Image (spheres, rainbow, N blue to C red):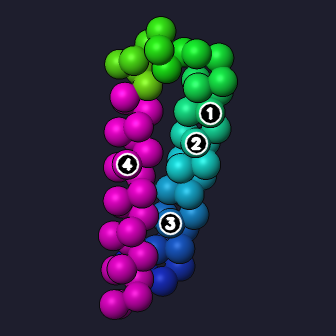
Amino acid sequence: MTPEEYEHVIDELQSVIDETHATLKRFENTGMNDELPKDYETLLAILDDAVKQQREHTQGMLSG
């Protein structure tokens, strides 16, 4: 991948991270995390995966 491609992927993943954080906050603020625990766990898994992917792409960009 080119540095520009890495940056694009990293930026897109940051958007996913930001949107997932916002959704998690809404879940917590409305008590949905207690009412829909599986959905809340799914959101946490999405966040974890996006952060891991972003880290991998950042490391790839820095070592490339």
Q: Give the image quarter of residue 59.
A: bottom left
Q: Position of residue 50 (x, y in %)?
A: 41, 52
Find out whether residue 54 is within the magenta segment: yes
Mark 3 / mark 2, whichever is N-terminal: 3
Q: Position of residue 7 (x, y in %)?
A: 53, 74
Cβ atoms under marks 1 and 2 closer than 8 Å:
yes
Q: Amino acid at mark 4?
A: Asp
Which residue is tagged 3?
A: 10
Which residue is tagged 1?
A: 25
Q: Where are the magenta residues, as a range?
A: 41-64
Check the picture and name the quadrant holding the N terminus. bottom left
- Mark number, residue 39: none
Check the picture and name the quadrant holding the C terminus. bottom left
Q: CA distance from mark 2 to mark 4?
A: 11 Å
Q: CA distance from mark 1 to mark 4?
A: 15 Å
Which residue is tagged 4?
A: 48
